Image (cartoon, rainbow, N blue to C red):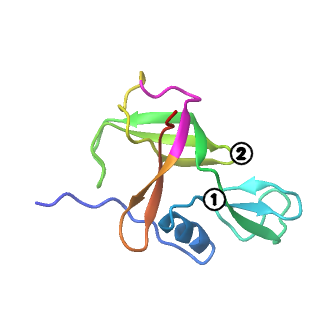
Amino acid sequence: MAEAARARPVPTPETQHFWEGTRAGELRLQRCDACEHVYFPPRPFCPSCASRKVSVFPATGKATLYSYVINHRPPAPGFTPPYAIAVVELEEGPRMMTNIIDCPQTPEALDLDMRLEVAFQKLDEEITLPLFRPAKG
C-alpha cells in the first residue's frame, strides 16, 4: 500500500504571489507601503495599520530557529517520525511555521537561534513548499 501524501496547501487569490514565488525558488513577503511593517502570512492589508497599500518583495531566505517541537507520533501523512515542526524568524522580521530538514531531528542538532536557510520542496506543478535547513558557511 502506498504511503499517504502530505497535506497540500490550497492557494487563494491573496496567497497566489507567495506560491508563484516558491515555484520560482523565491520566498516572497509583503511590506506595508504606509508604515513599512513586513509581515507573513500573506493578506491584502497590513496587520499593523490596516492599510491596503502593500508591496510584495523577495526575502533573503535567511532565518533563525525560534522554536520547535519534535514529533515522534502518531505518524501524519507524508511525514516519517521523528520530524521537527518549527517556527523560524525570518531575517526580515516575520515568523513562519515550517519544517527543518537536512539535519538530525534531535534536540542536540536543533539549537535555538541556529542560522537557517530556505530550501524548496516541490510537491507538484503548482505547490512548492518552503522548508528550512541549517545554513552553510
Which of 12 and 89 lies nearest the eye of the viewer? 89
Report x, y in % for residue 91: 67, 43
- What amino acid is found at the position of numbered circle 1 in the picture? Pro
Q: Which residue is mark 2?
A: 93
* Relative horizontal placement of residue 48, taking residue 62 as reference (left or right): right
Q: Which label is found at residue 41? A: 1
- Residue 110 part of the magenta-drawn span: yes
Magenta span of residues: 109-117
Q: Which label is found at residue 120? A: none
- What amino acid is found at the position of numbered circle 2 in the picture? Gly
Report x, y in % for residue 119: 46, 50
- Residue 27 part of the magenta-drawn span: no
Report x, y in % for residue 73: 30, 39
2 or 1: tag closer to the N-terminus: 1
Q: Residue furthest front?
A: 137
Q: Residue furthest bottom?
A: 13
Which of 122 and 68 lies nearest the eye of the viewer? 122
Instruction: Name the residue rendered at 51%, 67% in the picture.
Output: 24
